[in-house]
Amino acid sequence: MNLLGTIHSPADLKALPPADLAQVCAEIRHAICEQVSKSGGHLAPNLGVVELTVAMHYVFDFSYDRLLFDVGHQCYTHKLLTGRQHLLPRLRQRGGMSGFPEPRESDFDLFTVGHAGTAIPTAVGMARGDSLNGEGWTVDKPNGRRTVSLIGDASIVNGVAMEGLNNAGTLKRQFLVVLNDNGMSIAKPQGAGLCILRSLAPLAYLWRVQETRERNGATYARRRKSQRSLSPNGRIIQGFHR
């Protein structure tokens, strides 16, 4: 049975049991590969975020919560899950699916965006606006709007992205940044930002090893402290957790 064809909105995705999500991801990959082979488009960036996008739509409600992409061309899976499968055969053509987020297609796309560094600062502005309107998520308002930015390892080093992270630390509310570090942008990444991300990769492995042994909250707090102290760039990363 084809599952993707039964998904007309994220609500249909949420109705599926978790065991079916792997099949949904496989069907999305097939659909993207088939269409890009005919019309062109961004293939690798979209294949790399299929599971991630499905998981986010399964957990959050982006008809109410906020989702922003950076770079925007990672949005094909998002569009297939939000009622736009009929537009895919005319990908990047008049009357078809735009290759980037496009609010004229769907309310699930919050603003028109391509390249790059814009998701975090824009999300900060939206999160602050939601809070001022009394709609933002806080501990005391668990039904408030949540905000999510999906950003790539090349986009994160943009000046406006760093400024956005700096401002995000003042929000005092939920704010999630998902870093998709795949080690490749248009070309192989270069510079100090890459070194910071590479230095954190072994620590993620240690985190997973410890997580299989210890589950209580006190140990989790100690583990986070240890992870920061082990990193040669821990002071920088720690500042964004506050």
Image (cartoon, rainbow, N blue to C red):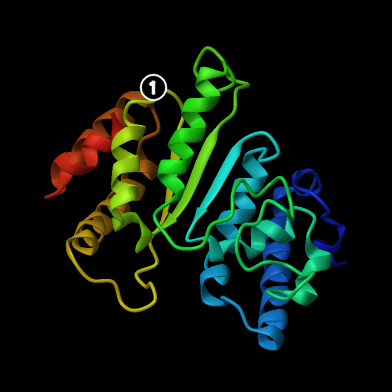
Question: Horizontal and vertical percent for residue 103?
Answer: 68, 51
Q: Amino acid at mark 1?
A: Lys
Q: Position of residue 78 (x, y in %)?
A: 65, 57
Picture residue at 20% right of the left edge, 40% below the top: 228
The answer to whether residue 6 of the structure is visible from this angle is yes
- Residue at (57% x, 44% y) in the render: 67
Crowding at dot 1, Cα within 10 Å, few <14 / some 14-19 / many 20+, comes out as few
| Callout 1 secondary element | loop
Q: Is residue 137 visible?
A: no
The quadrant of the image that shows the C terminus is: top left
User: Height in image: 74 above or below 8?
Assistant: below
Q: State the residue at coordinates (37%, 42%).
A: 211
Residue 117 image point, x, y percent: 39, 55
Does 194 sit left or right of 7 as displayed? Answer: left
For residue 54, which quarter of the picture?
A: bottom right
211 sits left or right of 91 in the view = left
- Residue at image x 58%, y 19%? 142
In the picture of the structure, the residue carrying the numbered disc 1 is 172
User: Quick one: 202 or 120, which is closer to the camera?
Assistant: 120
Q: Is residue 211 above or below residue 142?
A: below
- State the residue in front, 117 or 205: 117
